[in-house]
Amino acid sequence: MLDAKYLRNELEETAQRLEARGFALDTAQLAALEERRKTLQVSTQELQAQRNTRSKSIGQAKARGEDIAPLLAHVGELGEQLEAAKAELAILLNDIELIVMGIPNLPDSDVPQGKDEDDNVEVLRWGQPRQFDFVIKDHTDIGEAMGGIDFGAAVKLSGSRFVVLKKHIARMHRGLAQFMLDLHTEEHGYTEAYVPYLVNADSLRGTGQLPKFSEDLFHTNPANEEGVGLMLIPTAEVPLTNLMRDEIVDEAELPIKYTAHTPCFRSEAGSYGRDIKGLIRQHQFDKVELVTLVKPQDSNDALEELTGCAEKVLQLLELPYRKMLLCTGDMGFTAAKTYDLEVWLPSQDCYREISSCSNTRDFQARRMQARFRNKETNKPELLHTLNGSGLAVGRTLVAILENNQQSDGSVIVPEVLRPYMGGLAIIS
RNA sequence: GGAGAGAUGGCAGAGUGGUCGAAUGCACCGGUCUUGAAAACCGGCAUGGGUUUAUAGCCCAUCUAGGGUUCAAAUCCCUAUCUCUCCGCCA
């Protein structure tokens, strides 16, 4: 959420900056609502103040043993006016909030202008895509041949966009998550967390999934009262970041760095026909998430550091990747600046997203009132929140299967993963 | 599933209808004292919002949340959520 004061004082400038990311802000509508809000709120508060003083004087009169009947008659109609004004104001504030909650974050000034993913800027490339001297298979064929990937079984259990993994593939999937968690906790200073996979609407509002992207979420429909209104997390960013919702932490505790391995659930509404085959786009996938909360002046550096932590995973697994700086038009709703990491997929002959690392600045923090106490002023200030995948486990599995495949259909296990695979060097 | 108790500021804990945004203690910040520290003493110390050039002032809201009663609610009523105790069940 943008700062309400900034929004109303710099309405045109805000609209201009949002245009860069393809968002059309209806400034005329907002200005009109704002004008009404101002007069109505001022007059409502004025009425409230009047009633407060009169009620107070009734109390004082009563204490002195005076007759309060005439005072009571006078305050009666004031109450009615106040009720009406309050009701009207509540509706208006609600309307305005709905609009403001649906406005995306402002892009940082160093984010390239652009319309879509074609305008993203490549920052660096790491590793060399391997040259194959045999006809390569995609991860589905490799996995199915090993009896380790079974889409048919998943269709029976749940439907399309789910998968059943077995044997070495299932183990590698598990090992990958362990490896990533160990790396981030032992080498990168993150605190491991185990979090709920079902969260309430307040949490989803805090990180920006609601109210605008409800259709991307899986909603629960419990048969009894218990658990009503809970939704499945689309990413661990939601529970991890919301740990700080309505909290004020000491400046000395910053930065706060959390990591968690969780499944993520996405309805993928509107992506019908995209990546139908394989593990790339699933309703349920595992991810190791990185979340950091920092002082405002530290968030630029924190984004570089966080992205570096995700890159480290790819480097240790020896997977070729490139780092993209997203343009204004391709960024997510809450992001001020985003790096995508894209891993090389031989079967698709291109780089595909495997991590997305964003600085949301105070956009999420304002929604959830996540703050720290400034040591100098002793006043609470909004934190900056950052999040990134470190990495998407399913897609990492895909990348390993495809990049490390051999002509006989077996796959070489990356060195760093072998301790998590009982020492296996090759799976087949 | 059944029975009961509770939810107040960073924490602890008063407050049962009227100058209560809320006593007191702890913590924290500043000062006096001290060679320095501690102790003692003095002072300060909630958050959100509105108005405004202003984190000057003024105003509104907030005692888990949402409704209700009343001129007036931390205080009375209803509902929800959460916590605790006991019984049952259970990984």
Image (spheres, rainbow, N blue to C red):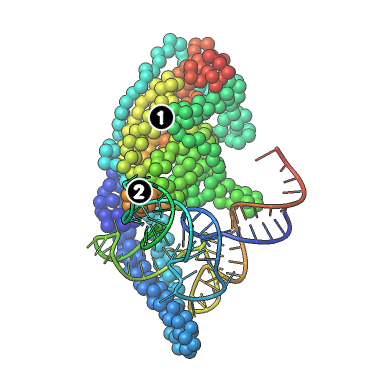
Return the chain for callout 1: A
Alpha carbon distance from label 1 to label 2: 29 Å
Closer to the eye: label 1 or 2: 2
Does A366 sit above or below residue A343?
Answer: below
Picture disc at residue A332: none
Residue A42 in the image, given as x and y percentages of width and height? 34, 69
- From the image, tell me which residue sits under label 1: A309
Question: Residue at 34% across / 23% down in the picture?
Answer: A125
Residue A354, image quadrant: top left
Residue drawn at point x = 35 percent, y = 49 percent: A374
Pick the residue in front: A257 or A387: A257
Residue at 45% of width from left, 18% of height from top? A403
**Residue B4 image offset from top left, x and y in percent:** 69, 61
Mark 2 Cα shell of 10 Å, populated few (<14), some (14-19), many (≥20) = few
Viewer-side residue, A265 vs A72: A72
The residue sitting at 58% across, 18% down in the picture is A422
Left or right of residue A185, residue B54 in this image: left
Q: Earlier in the sequence, mark 1 or mark 2?
A: 1
| Dot 1 alpha-carbon crowd within 10 angstroms: few under 14, some 14 to 19, many 20 or more | many
Residue A112 placement (x, y as % from top left)? 27, 37
The image quadrant of residue A39 is: bottom left
| Badge number at residue A375 | 2
What is the three-letter code of the residue carrying label 1? Cys
Label 2 is placed on what type of residue?
Lys
Q: Nearer the viewer, residue A29 or A76?
A: A76
Give the structural element (helix, strand or loop) at label 2. loop
